[in-house]
Image (tube, helix red, strand yellow):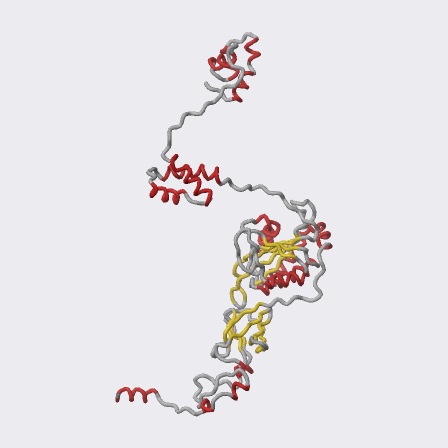
């Protein structure tokens, strides 16, 4: 029996028992080995060093001539599948099985592409230094006006874990930054930095790993106005926003689950009713009452801006033949005398208004409407249609200009535009066709 170094050292501990006159059988019985093994390693002629374990001679494998090629492929692309490697080896002359390739790739991948370290240090921040923001999808809620999709906005102060949550029916730019304003008012100040996911309201476009992330212009302007810096978490690293990620689940379990709501205002009220319970608890990580630790956190926040920042989304749309502009599946009217069909206009959208502007060297505001919150709505100012011919009205005897940009364009039109056009019944054309 060939012993390992550890087993040899354990057996050598019985040398004193042999010197006392014990038999090989007695020693073997105590050591749990064969008496021949005890005699081999405890006799006076046994070597004073542990035995060397020699490796077995290995016969050549069919995969051996291709190992360098496979290793080279894996060094270039760590995620290359064994099935793809097998497909590439066969045209090169490999006659082995796919199973042999799969077993070698499993061993080589661990050697060439070691798994990333999953351990990490817990980071702590100073009071008022950081907050984290995240969205939660709360599903569809039935309201008096129909079903709406509800989202929860979460902001957590990283030092104390003091939470804020509100519920909205849209994740657009205006709603996103309006939720920030409400959170800052709730906390009584602005943190030095806020950590975000790569959401489209913060990031202008997605880039590869290691590249600088371009920020949305409106996000940069809002952060500069309020006085905080934007930190974008790397992809697939939830640990960066663990404080707020946990809050999303806690609020959902303690505030929403098992309850029915008719509107988002009721959901906001339910959260505010539960908030004192949460703030009175001892947090498991920092071991203090959240409300007590939040006093230092809130005291270190920056001051609120003196004037609110008006978040404005800008969209380009075209005017339809009915002098309506479509936005979010709703229609908004414009004055028919100031536009023409297919005119490109700019929509400046805030949380509560939709302003329609005619772009150019001197932009002109055409109309301002309250923003529709139900898809498919018609937001029409009847004054915009005053004097506009009604399609199909038999009282309209003349072909009138449908729209014009301004008085100068009307004056420049040819007088032929006001010539009366005779009306003919369609049967007249059928008769002409029959004669022909």
Is there any visible trace of residue 269 in the rendered image?
Answer: yes
Q: Quadrant of residue 178?
A: bottom right
What residue is shown at x 43% (from left), y 92% (from top)?
Answer: 420
Q: Position of residue 267 (x, y in %)?
A: 60, 60
In depth, the one of 212 and 349 nearer the eye is: 212
Residue 25 is left or right of residue 184, and the answer is: left
Q: Residue furthest top?
A: 21
In depth, the one of 174 and 343 nearer the eye is: 343
Q: Position of residue 221 (x, y in %)?
A: 63, 63
Q: Is residue 203 above or below residue 82?
A: below
The quarter of the image holding the C terminus is bottom left
Q: Is residue 395 above or below residue 262?
A: below
The quarter of the image holding the N terminus is top left
Q: Position of residue 256 (x, y in %)?
A: 58, 56
What residue is shown at x 50% (from left), y 40% (from top)?
Answer: 114
Is there any visible trace of residue 277 in the rendered image?
Answer: no
Q: Is residue 320 above or below residue 124?
A: below
In depth, the one of 363 and 12 nearer the eye is: 363
Residue 20 is left or right of residue 299, and the answer is: left
Q: Quadrant of residue 86?
A: top left
Q: Position of residue 202 (x, y in %)?
A: 58, 59
What residue is shown at x 52% (from left), y 69% (from top)?
Answer: 328
Residue 369 is left or right of residue 342, and the answer is: right
Number of numbered tags placed on the structure image: 0
């Amino acid at each position: 029996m060939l012993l390992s170094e550890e087993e040899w050292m354990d057996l050598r501990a019985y040398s004193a028992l042999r010197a006392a006159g014990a038999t090989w059988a007695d020693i073997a019985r105590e050591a749990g080995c064969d008496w021949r093994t005890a005699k081999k390693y405890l006799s006076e002629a046994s070597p004073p060093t542990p035995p060397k374990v020699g490796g077995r001679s290995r016969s050549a494998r069919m995969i051996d001539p291709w190992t360098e090629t496979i290793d080279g492929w894996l060094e270039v692309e760590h995620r290359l599948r064994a099935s793809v490697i097998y497909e590439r080896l066969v045209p090169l002359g490999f006659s082995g099985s796919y199973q042999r390739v799969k077993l070698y790739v499993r061993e080589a991948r661990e050697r060439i592409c070691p798994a990333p370290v999953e351990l990490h240090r817990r980071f702590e921040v100073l009071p008022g230094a950081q907050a984290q923001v995240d969205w939660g999808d709360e599903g569809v809620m039935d309201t008096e006006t129909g079903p709406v999709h509800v989202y929860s906005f979460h902001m957590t102060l990283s030092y104390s874990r003091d939470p804020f949550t509100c519920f909205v029916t849209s994740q657009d730019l205006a709603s996103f930054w309006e939720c920030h304003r409400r959170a800052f008012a709730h906390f009584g100040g602005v943190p030095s930095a806020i950590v975000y996911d790569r959401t489209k309201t913060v990031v202008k476009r997605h880039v590869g790993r290691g590249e600088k992330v371009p920020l949305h212009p409106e996000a940069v302007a809002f952060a500069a106005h309020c006085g905080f810096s934007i930190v974008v978490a790397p992809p697939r690293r939830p640990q960066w926003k663990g404080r707020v990620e946990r809050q999303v689940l806690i609020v959902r379990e303690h505030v929403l689950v098992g309850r029915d709501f008719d509107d988002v205002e009721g959901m906001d009220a339910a959260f505010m009713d539960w908030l004192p319970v949460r703030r009175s608890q001892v947090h498991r990580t920092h071991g203090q009452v959240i409300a007590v630790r939040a006093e230092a956190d809130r005291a270190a926040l920056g001051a609120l801006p003196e004037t609110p920042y008006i978040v404005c989304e800008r969209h380009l749309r075209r005017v339809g033949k009915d002098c309506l502009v479509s936005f979010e599946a709703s229609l908004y009217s414009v004055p028919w005398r100031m536009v023409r069909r297919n005119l490109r206009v700019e929509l400046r959208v805030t949380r509560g208004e939709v302003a329609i502007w005619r772009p150019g060297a001197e932009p002109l505001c055409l109309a301002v409407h309250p923003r529709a919150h139900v898809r498919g709505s018609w937001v029409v100012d009847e004054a915009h249609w005053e004097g506009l011919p009604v399609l199909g009205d038999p009282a309209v005897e003349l072909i009138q200009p449908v729209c014009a940009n301004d008085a100068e364009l009307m004056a420049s039109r040819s007088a032929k535009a006001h010539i009366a056009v005779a009306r003919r019944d369609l049967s007249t054309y059928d008769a002409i066709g029959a004669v022909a």
